[in-house]
Amino acid sequence: MSTPDTAATIAAEVAAGRRRAEEVCRAALGRIAARNGELKAFLELTAEHALERAVAIDRDVVAGRPVGPLAGVPVAVKDNLCTTFGHTTCGSRILAGYVSPYSATAVERLEAAGAVIVGKTNLDEFAMGSSTENSGYFPTRNPWDPERVPGGSSGGSAAAVAAGFVPAALGSDTGGSIRQPAALCGVVGLKPTYGRVSRYGLVAYGSSLDQVGPLAGTVTDAALLLAVLSGRDPRDSTSVDQAVPDYRGALRDAPLAAVAHGLRIGVPAEYFGAGLDAETEGAVRSALRVFEQLGATLVDVTLPRTPQAIAAYYLVATAEASGNLARYDGVHYGYRTPHPADIEDLYSATRAEGFGPEVKRRIMLGTFALSAGYYDRYYNKALRVRRLIQEDFTAAFDHCDVVAGPTSPTPAFRLGERTADPLQMYLADVYTISANLAGIPAISLPCGFTRAGLPIGLQLQGPLFGETLLLQAARLYERATDWHTRRAG
Amino acid sequence: MVQVCGLDVEPIIGLEIHVQLATRTKMFCGCPLEFGARPNSRVCPVCLGLPGALPVINRQAVELGVQAALALNCSIAELTKWDRKSYYYPDLPKNYQISQYDLPLAFDGLFEFPIDDRIARIRILRAHLEEDAGKNVHDLPGCSGIDLNRAGTPLLEIVTQPDLRSADEAREFAVQLQRLVHYLGVSHADMQKGHLRFEPNINVRIHRDGQVFVTPIVEVKNLNSFRSLHGAIAYEIPRQVEEWLATGVTAATGNKRNRGWDDTREVTVPQREKEEAHDYRYFPDPDLVPLTVQAAWVAELRERQPELPLCRTERFISEYSLPPRDAHALVEDRATADLLDHAAEAGGDKVVLGKHFLSLWARFANERGTTIAGLRISPGRLAELANLVATGRINATAAAQVAEAMLANHDAPTVLAEELGLMQSRDTDRIAAWVTEALAANAAAVQDALANPKKARAARGFLTGQVMKLSGGRADPKIVGELIDRALAERAGA
């Protein structure tokens, strides 16, 4: 299969009237029909809604009305983002059949920009997981090797982009849930600065860590989506009122040339220690040399609290999750146990039947961490570690512009390989978690393949609201390499 | 100290009061606050706790909270934050309540009010903002319902120190607080609509044989009338003494317990509770950013703070010579009290204004089913009418007629009094003529006034009445008196 069109190309051609959005949408639906049965990237297709939108855009083009920067671009949306069309299940049985009466701000912004949302993608239940095997419905398979996981929790979105179903998708990232599947599926995934993109309508997992962001085939497409998604939303108090730069304009040749020379790439020793797969390390180190050849300098930096990040993350995220998921109780909406004995039984049986094991594990962890007598020992201590991790990054960014390293310690693993050992699964997030704890932006982009043909991801992390430079650094590398042109299948 | 079962007993009472704030919309969303609307018709994704919805702070709720806290002499926090209080209940859509745990909006206050010829001084521990729950509805056939219209209603929870010492004192505190928040416009403070809810914490210190025994604290939940608040405390005090006599359990050996109030039997009853103590697992709500309260804003609110009802009542008693009960009632209606002050500022005689507000204006307002402020008479006109009386240009009866005319048209009271012919006549020649006429027509009375010491006083009064009658009430009574005295003296001397 030839390289599918990018979002930028489609939007330009649709807006110019050279291609019809409806035709683009039908082609995407056709690609999905051909291979989604095998990969199971989607929980639900919203074909009817998508075609209606596409036809409306075509009408606008014909009538000469202005169309948005994503006119006619087929996009997939992770199913923890609320949409008034189709269902919003979060990959959980407890929300089977749930229809949201409103759409997430991120979804509204995409649609206002002309995007055509073709379906809701699979995820680890409530975004808790790193393989999409925790979906309450079915696992998604990696387009590069269907015996392997696509990563997670935005595994459906990553697989949909990697399989060429859509040029771009929305994911959410609480501890690496955009970047890790992007790495494992060989696509670009960007977690914005906390507060850059509204969380309104993103079903909460760890509210102080959650951020909506794009997955795409190219850095430019990721920038295109980020520009549409970013900005203050009065419905989200944690969204930040800060001007949105011209992310895509910053990727033109002139600004890129201006940043290449003197770009300081921080390389933390902590990201190249035990547990890092040798082929992954090799690919990442080669990528660093590419940066040097482009005129950048490598700087040794240290992020000494990296080893504590996983512990801190699994306390903060689960504590918040225990509160966020308390509302799924069978009383107001969603699944309800069929024959409750009394109200206590209604609560406990509904939750016992509706949630999967990983969600229950995390709710219990979080509930414990917040319990009287343990709060200081666990939750408060985790918050202190979190501040130290933020300080680590602040110190590191005194010496460098971006921090580089692997996104995931290993390439895609086999389905079922880690399901019996949750701790082993948690380690998949070791490099990605810190960015969420620190609130900083981070991007994963393809930087090579293992001998077995599995993609490897390079992660770049930047200072708060440093998305522009992050995208520029990523684009510089992408322009100098051809990993992103390879397609799965 | 009170006597119970022959023992000296000292009740220790603290109050938690939930005050529903008079905001236009809910605490964290734009749904309107509306009592009695169709169930679940004033709801949105935020107050329903739907997946993905996020709360946003209502600025007006913070403002009203600060206003109430300032009136309670509280310090206002420079930094306050929001916490989740977790518990499962069907009327709580998120199964956590957004409240404030360790950094409340306000703290360290003092509320003073008069009771039994002394001033009670009750310390305020803290005041914080939180959202209300919905309501479980159990009167449906075959099922229970939940009405979430109330969910997300802003509440100010005020917590006192355990400084109250009797049911009477607690009730008076509650009454004065209700008056205060209503007066400030912080709450509609409608008891019927549950705008104020009380939860007293009660225990007693028992003195026996030189030793002091302290009973376990009992919290009586969800009282929504002054009567039930008083009743619950009055019931708990002897009950706790009797329980201690029977079991010997003290605060050191027993836990705090919750009880409910049975309004028909007028007793407190134990509440069904789970074995384990409640663990609300408070933690900072990550969906809301901590709130920095600007000192300049607080200073501005402090500046705008009106004179508080207790001070104003005292001032009304002395300035307008009002009886205490009437002063109290007048101050309750802030717009009318403001009108009275404005009329006085416009130069009106204060004592006459006070009388007018209690008598004629109150009557007219009452007849029209409104308040005095609702009569929409300007302070200037009110002052002018008061001064016509104060300077003796019209009498009290005439004032009532002028006032009625003022309600019907917009002319000035002086003009109306003249048109109606109610101005006191000060024309001595005219009055003298009436005196001559009256004396001529009542020779017997003149005789009595001059020569019958037993009847002189009554006769003189009768003659004055006759002159007033001839003048149609318009003669200045003072001048009439002088002229009668002069005429009688002339006759005596003749």
Image: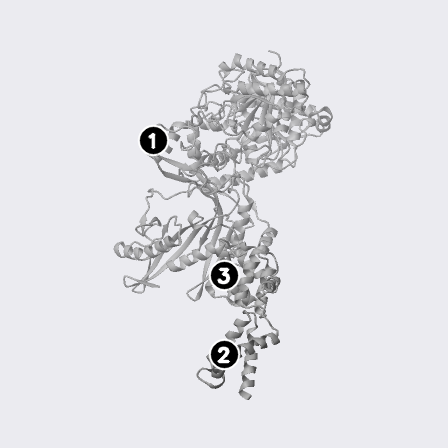
In three-dimensional space, the C-alpha distance between marks 1 and 2, rounded to whole angstroms, equals: 99 Å
Tell me residue B64's x, y (percent).
53, 49
Q: Give the position of the C terminus of chain A as an image quadrant.
A: top right
Residue B360 sits above or below residue B27 on the image: below
Given the image, on which type of amino acid does mark 1 rest? Pro
Tell me residue A331's x, y (percent).
40, 33
Q: Give the position of the N terminus of chain A as an image quadrant.
A: top right
Quarter of the image for residue A173 reads top right
Task: Kindly state the secondary structure of the residue where label 3 is placed.
Answer: helix
Tell me residue A485's x, y (percent).
63, 16
In three-dimensional space, the C-alpha distance between marks 2 and 3, rounded to whole angstroms, equals: 56 Å
Q: Residue at x 54, y 81 (%)?
A: B485
Q: How crowded is mark 3: few (under 14 residues within 10 Å), some or many (20 or more)?
A: some
Mark 1 vs mark 2: in front? 2
Mark 3 vs mark 1: in front? 3
Q: Respond whether the residues carrying marks 1 and 2 are from the same subunit.
A: no
Mark 2 vs mark 3: in front? 2
In three-dimensional space, the C-alpha distance between marks 3 and 1, rounded to whole angstroms, equals: 55 Å
Task: Kindly state the secondary structure of the residue where label 1 is placed.
Answer: loop
Task: Kindly state the secondary structure of the residue where label 2 is placed.
Answer: loop
**Could you say which disc has been placed on residue B442 in the image?**
2
Tell which of A199 and A183 is nearer to you.
A199
Given the image, on which type of amino acid does mark 3 rest? Leu
Q: Residues within 10 Å of mark 1 (few under 14, many from 20)?
A: some
Disc 3 designates what residue?
B310
Write down the chain letter for disc 2.
B
Given the image, on which type of amino acid does mark 2 rest? Asn
Q: Residue at x 60, y 73 (%)?
A: B426
Disc 1 designates what residue?
A340
Q: Respond whether the residues carrying marks 2 and 3 are from the same subunit.
A: yes
